[in-house]
Structures are given as structure tokens and as C-alpha cells.
Image (cartoon, rainbow, N blue to C red):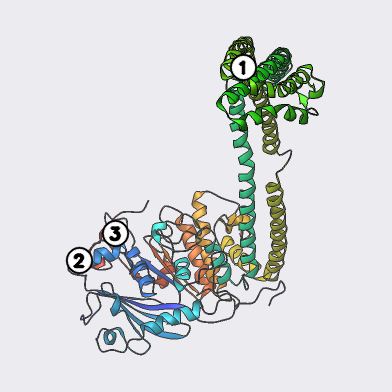
Amino acid sequence: MNAVGIPEPFPAKPHLWVETLWLLKSLTASEPLREIPLRQGLNLIVSPPGKGSSGHGVGKTAFCQLLRFALDDPLWSEGSALRDELLQSEDLKEGAVAARVHVGGETWTVLKPWRHQKMYRASRNLDWRQLAVDNAENEYPAYQDALRQHFVGTLPVQELPGSGQPIEWHHILAWCSRDQNARYQHYFQWRAEGVRFSLPAKSPLALIQIVLGLLHDATTLRDLDGAAKAVESQKSRLDQLREEPARLLNHVRRQLANRLEAPINTPFRQEGLIEHPNLIGIARQRHEAYQQELQSIEEERKVLAHERQRLLERRTPLKSNLDVIANEVAQMEALIAGDIEQLEALQNEAASLQQNLSKHCDAGNRLLKECDYVIRRIGQVQIDRKQRSVLHQQTKESLESSLTPLRRRLGEIGDEITPLDNALADIDGKSVDLDQRYAQALSDDQLLSETIENYEYYESLASGKTQSADMDAVQRKLDLVRRRYEQLQLQLEKERQVVAGRRQAISEAMKAVARSLPSFQWGVFNDEEKHRNHPFRMGPMHSTTYKVLEILAGDVACLLDSTQEQSFHPGFLLHDSPREAEMSENILWALLGHVAENGGDSLQYIVTTSTAPPESFKAYERYRLSTDSVDGLLLRKRLGVEQAALT
């Protein structure tokens, strides 16, 4: 290591590089449609502008897609515009791509027809012609396993923190071979159709941190992500609990306004010093009205009770006399009928009254033994009992003649009692009405008071002055998970300090790239959360054009850093037409020159471009395509997916 703790680069071949790409018209072809040789280091696939041509539409993007296809990019098999067009072509539908690929020191020959996925083949010993034969030994699963083992199996973390999604080779390949259709819009946008991350907002950065050797244990990061979700969950729950009082507050406000028959927009309290209608003021007036009504009802109750007492005092002696005469009439009728048992029962009435003398009289609220009419009635019945022997001696005719005046008197007393009974019934009816009015007024007053109390309670909750028991419980949980989150942040920062040397090495690589470019003085790599969307930066100049340049420079810095022993980067990079309309030629060649000078044979950087290379870059030109003739096109046939010029 050097003085700042950054490991020195070690000389090695790229972990991954493609030596040759063949395009075949069919599996039975004896010669390839196109053979494109590639080398370690910088490789240029160029299509300079020609006569009346901008250099576009020759097949550069198709070359990149077919190269990715040979490197086991699964998106090809799932469908692409290029694949669809090739399968629809009578000349090319039986075609295939073949490549000689070096993976971790082993050399593989891969053959992949674009029609039949079951015919994908690979071998460490055979060439593409031998693989095209049906009975050739097929090691394609072993080829896929080699890619996984060398570029995923060696990673210190096998799953993406946060989502738990297993890291796959095609995730890393997408980063190292950006889709030209994504147009370098965002550092983490690698494919126009996405890379199938289950957590696309966070997974790309986490993958880069793992591959660059910045994350050796994802436990803290996973725990931190879980704590962050717990914080958001508790915050959301607390917000819901706080929103509920606000909703209930509006409901109670409407309920109160309706109860008071006030406009819905009437303020709850007086606002300012000027007196305006408000619900509290109206409620206070309504409460006073209810209290006055309750007091008035009490006064009416007292008047009715006094009148009822007066009527009872008039009615009671009349009723007593009525009962005495009725008893006497009943005895005579029983005697005439010869009903001795009924006669005995009627004659025992005096004894029954004597047993109740200790009870109160309803009419006068006094003991029965103190009521004159009761004593008189008892005496009368006792006298009547003495006369029983006389009654037995009377004839039936004389008994019936004696009944006539008694019955007349009975009717007279009944006539006197009837208006009193009617008056008492009227008082009882009025009492029932008063009871109902009292209950209604009391209920309305209580409901009004409860509504105001509810409003003030929900208002206190909604304003945050007080909290409910549920809010307190959730707040305690929120405070707890926040403390846990803060502890994990400190732990993560400690772990970040352990790999500070790696981060510094990548920043130094980015600085070197920036300084190799015209007008740039500094470059930096920062993977902190606040720089999530912009990890690679250069300056001091900046514009939308340089945003694209920063993305390319960041990729190049990671590629050059792949020579460090602590990096897990494949040492392979493919850029499809990175300059068109996004940077000047001198910046492009300065960027490529930096890779050529500092990368050597320890990496492979493949660039397609329609910019004619200067003489100093002729040695890196591996293949030249052209629109001047059909033979100059990648597949010797014009494809619709390559027609649109880039802007």
C-alpha cells in the first residue's frame, strides 16, 4: 500500500474480456457473416461519416446488444426489437452470434442462435464450427456458472441489502455495458427497460458498493434499512392518529353547528376583539335557555302537585263514604242471595282497616289511624256488624226496599267523585308531558355540553397540545426506533471508515480521469446517502453535457480501479456511442486516451463511435463499419432499429 493506505495496482489480465465476435448467417455456414477481433485494453468500433452519411445506422448498437447476448444477458431471450427484426428476416432468421470469451483465466467459445434458446452452446475446447454440429459437447451451463462464480460468487455480499434479492451476473453486466437507448441520463439507469431490481431506488448503488469493495458486510445496512422502514411506519401511524382528531373535529363542528342551527362556517370561538357570532357564544345562550326551561318545568310541576293534593283531599272522604255504602249494599245483596261466605268477607273489612292503621294516607300524608274518615268507617262497619242479627231477621222484601236509598246515595257520591277523577287524570297527563319536556331539555343540554367537550378534546389532539393514549404509545415506539436508527447510522459510519482507503482510491482514480480532460481540475467519488443520485462528480465546469461526461468518467474510474486487488469489478466496459451530441471530440479522445495510457492490457474497454479517430488512435481501431455500401453494415443488411440518427 502507498502512504495513504491505497493498495497499489497489481499487473493482471482482465477478469473478463472478449477476444472475437462472430456473426453467423446460419449454423450450417462454413464462414461467418462478420468476424470482429478484439483485444485487451482499448477497442474502437468506428463508423466515421461518409458521403452523405452521418455514420449512424450501420449496426453499432446491434454489435453491443449481440456482444451482451454472448455474455449471457437474459434480456435478449425475453425479447428485443433487434431480435424480433432478425427473426423476421428471411436472410438472418436462422443466424447466431458466437464469441471467444475469457472468464477468470479460462477461454470459452460461446454459440447462441437468436431463434432457439435450447440450442445455446459453449465449450472450453471447441471452436464455433464444432459447436454448430449437433453432437458437439455442450458446456453452456458450466459457462453460465463460470460467470456467476467469478463475478458473483467472489463477492463478500451475495444479496442486495434492503430487498434481500440475490445478486446475479446480469446485474453487473448491465452496469458494465450500458444500454445506448438509456442515453446516459442517470448514473444508475443502465437499461431502458430496467434491470429487474426488486428495489430499483436503492439496489444499483448497493451493487456498486459491493463490487467496488466498499461493502463487506451488509448486516448493518440491512438493519438500517429495516429501522428506516420502522421509523416511517411509526411516523405514518402517528400521522394517521393525528389526522383522525382533525377529521373528528370537523365532524363534531358540523354536528355542533347543526345542533345550534347555525351556519356551517360559524367560527367555534370569538375571533378578535369585535363580537361576532360564534358557536361557543350560541351554545352558551342555548344552555341558559335549557336551564330556564328546566326551571320553568319544575315550577309547573310544583303547581300541579299542589293542585293534585287539593283534589285528593276532597276526593278521599267521598271515596271512603262511597266504599262504606258500597260495602253495606254488597252485604245486603249477599244476604239476599244467601252468600254467607261473601257476607263474612265484607264484614271483615273493618278488621282489615285496623291492620293498616300504622300506614300513611295518600290524601293527607298522615297515619291512617289519624284520619277521621277511616275511624268513622271502621265504627260504621262495627255498628253494621252488631246489626247483622237484625239483618238476618229482616225479610227479603224489606232488605230490597232498604237498598234503594243506599244505591241512590251511592250514585250521588259517584257523581261528586267523577269530576275530581277527571281533574286528577288531566293533572297526571300534564305531569307526563312535563316529564317528557324535562327529559328532552336535559338530554339536549347534556348533548350540547358533551359536543363542546368533544370539540375541545379533539382540538387539543389535533393541535398537538395533548396526545391520546394511542398517540403516546406510538410516540414511544417512534422514539425507540429512531434511537435504534441513529445507533445504526453511527455503526455504519464506523464501517465506512474501515474502507475509507478504498473510497479514497476510487476518488483518486476519478480525479485522475478529470485532470486528463480539458478544463477539469478535480473529480471525486462519494457514495453517501445525500449523493445517492450523483456519486461521481467533476469540476469546476458543469452543465447537462458534463452530467453525461461524469457518468462516463465514473464508469472509466471504476474500470481503471479494477486493477486494485480489493476491487471485484470484471475489468470490462462497453460504451455504445458515448459522444454523439453530448461532448466535444477533444474531450472524448482525452477520456479514451487516459484509459489507453493507464489501463494497458489489465482491462478491456470497448467503445463504438461515429467520430473518426485521430491518427494517434488508429492502433485501437478494431473494426470499421460504413454506410457507403451494404457490405459496410454490421449484418450486411440494413436494420430498422439502426435507422434513427442520434441527436
Q: From the viewer's perspective, tell me whether residue 174 is left or right of residue 389.
A: left
Q: Quadrant of residue 25?
A: bottom left
Residue at x 57%, y 70% (from the top left corner)? 210
Q: Quadrant of residue 44?
A: bottom left
Q: Position of residue 620 (x, y in %)?
A: 42, 72
Is residue 579 positioned above or below 407 on the image? below
Secondary element at image label 3: helix
Q: Which one is earlier in the sequence, the residue at label 1 or at label 3? A: 1
Label disc, if present, on residue 627 of the rendered structure: none
Task: Say what amino acid the circle numbered 3 marks.
Answer: Val
Q: What's the distance in space between the residues labelled 3 and 2, CA to CA?
A: 13 Å
Asked whether residue 269 appears in the rendered view, the answer is no
Task: Say what amino acid the circle numbered 2 marks.
Answer: Ser
Residue farthest toward the left in the current orientation of the protein: 90
| Residue closest to the eye, 356 or 492 | 356
Q: What's the distance in space between the residues labelled 1 and 2, CA to CA?
A: 107 Å
Q: What's the distance in space between the residues labelled 1 and 3, CA to CA?
A: 102 Å
| Residue closest to the eye, 325 or 587 | 325
The residue labelled by disc 1 is 425
Secondary element at image label 1: helix
Residue at x 26%, y 66% (from the top left corner)? 632
Q: Which one is earlier in the sequence, the residue at label 3 or at label 2? A: 2
The residue labelled by disc 3 is 641
Residue at x 70%, y 30% (from the top left corner)? 348
The residue labelled by disc 2 is 89
